[in-house]
Amino acid sequence: MKPTTALLAAVCVLFLVFGAGCISFSQPDPNGTIWKLESFGQDNSAPTAPISLSFNNGVISGSSGINTYAGSYTVSTSDGKLSFTGIASTKMAGPVGLMNQETAYLSALGQTASYTISGETLTLKDANGNTLLTFTNPLADTAWKLISYTPAGKTAQLNAAGFVSIMFEPNNELTGNTGINTYSATWKLNGNTLDISQPSTSKMLGPQFMEDQESDFISLLGSVAGFTLSAGQLDLTDAAGVPIMSFEQILPGTSWQLMQINGENIETNIQTTLTFNEDGTISGQAPVNRFAGQWHQHGVEGLTFSNVAATMLISYDSFASNTEQQFFEILNSVTSYTAADNSLTLNADGVNSLQFVPVYQDILGGSSWYHADNSAVTLSFSPDASQIFGQGPVNTFSAAVTYEQYGEVSISNFISTRMSGTQTQMNAEQAFFNIVEDLESVSFNDGQLVLTDGVNFLYFNPQQN
């Protein structure tokens, strides 16, 4: 080796050691990319609500957890310099924890001086090289449920029926449920362009309206070209940038009641509930005590709980106390969850599990339905779901509803008009009213609302707004 060459090599080694010279600090251009926040600072604390950041021709935008924001950015790809200016956000209020997190996030953007992009990770740093924010692929390891969609060739959105999910696995596999069948495909993200392959599905049958929705959903997946993320909502868009399907996260804002522990029904005088608050906290009622804590989602179906604390009431009901102890032991060991049309199961160590059903009163409030075999027969719930009313085969009706555990209900103050019809209509109405008056429970199945008096069943499809 020539002396000059050897000297240069030695200098490069020294520069490598001290982090200067002979290293290219150039970075990929962030323009046209979208990211989700993975962690704050160097301690890697995870956000408790979805936070996103997109770059588009000198403009940034995204969701800061509660509000949306926008601003300008200046970037130098040759040396990795990056700064944000003029950041402004909407003024929605939210839980204190989320508001504090939002303030910290926007403050960190204001301190940004440089960035690095490595694979699917974007890191923002301050002027001293300290990590401020770490972002990752906005879709990988996320799971969502469909809330509305626009069928091909139409402009009006339809509300989704049943539990329709989409899960972006980190290995570029796409899985989920159509409300009737499971499906699988592949997905690929290039900047803000999203490609989804033609899905393959299982072959179960369901109600016609659910089969129609499934057909629309699978067809729309094939026409997805992009996406937007804002305030916990995922919109999949077509080639023109028009949203064709809207999704929300599966757990935030939902309430459940415990039905089984390790496959065995529980019977206590106090209903055990669990609510996933949007600020990353949980709250609920155990068989004896109230409790609160935090929940953390990991990937598509990973779930853990931390800092679970309860009141200190003592019960002389040994069964309730033992049930509560078992409930908390499993809750603190949960590692994953599975959600379906009518249930939530929390899984711990592959053996123990907690199975929940929805708090039906919360879900049914303000909803409207029509009979699966006769669309003229309708059923609606008041906003607090304490009253039902509707149209029978001939007469209108109303009644009060009381909700108990696991979807069990009781009906009181049933009244109807006194119009007459044909003998066939009156016979059908009497059979219908008999079931409603003697109603014992409500549930969901394949997107339908199922009413039963313990012997007979009524199936209702959701009314579209």
Image (cartoon, grey):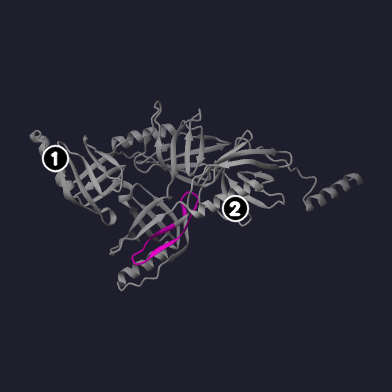
The crowd level at tag 1 (other Cα within 10 Å; few <14, some 14-19, many 20+) is few
Q: As shown in the figure, which amino acid type bears the numbered disc 2?
A: Phe
Q: Which residues are magenta?
A: 282-302
Relative image position of residue 100 (x, y in whole percent): 54, 53
As drawn, is 235 to the left or to the right of 400? right
**Residue 427 location, quadrant:** top left
Out of 390 and 318, give the one closest to the viewer.
390
**Residue 282 location, quadrant:** bottom left
**Residue 160 location, quadrant:** top left
Residue occupying the far bottom of the picture: 316
Relative image position of residue 4 (x, y in whole percent): 91, 45
Q: Which labelled disc corresponds to residue 417? A: 1
As drawn, is 164 to the left or to the right of 266? right
Closer to the chain start, of discs 2 and 1, is: 2
Which residue lies at the image location 35% right of the left edge and 51% below the top edge?
A: 343
Count up the numbered dots: 2
Q: Quadrant of the C terminus?
A: top left
Query: In this rendering, is residue 225 above or below 362?
Result: above
Nearer to us of marks 2 and 1 is 1
Q: CA distance from mark 2 to mark 1?
A: 62 Å
Q: Which labelled disc corresponds to residue 465? A: none
As drawn, is 119 to the left or to the right of 423? right
Residue occupying the far top of the picture: 153
Name the secondary structure under disc 2: strand
Q: Which residue is mark 2?
A: 40
Out of 418 and 169, give the one closest to the viewer.
418
The reply to whether residue 402 is in sight is yes
Magenta-drawn stretch, dominant element (helix, strand or loop): strand
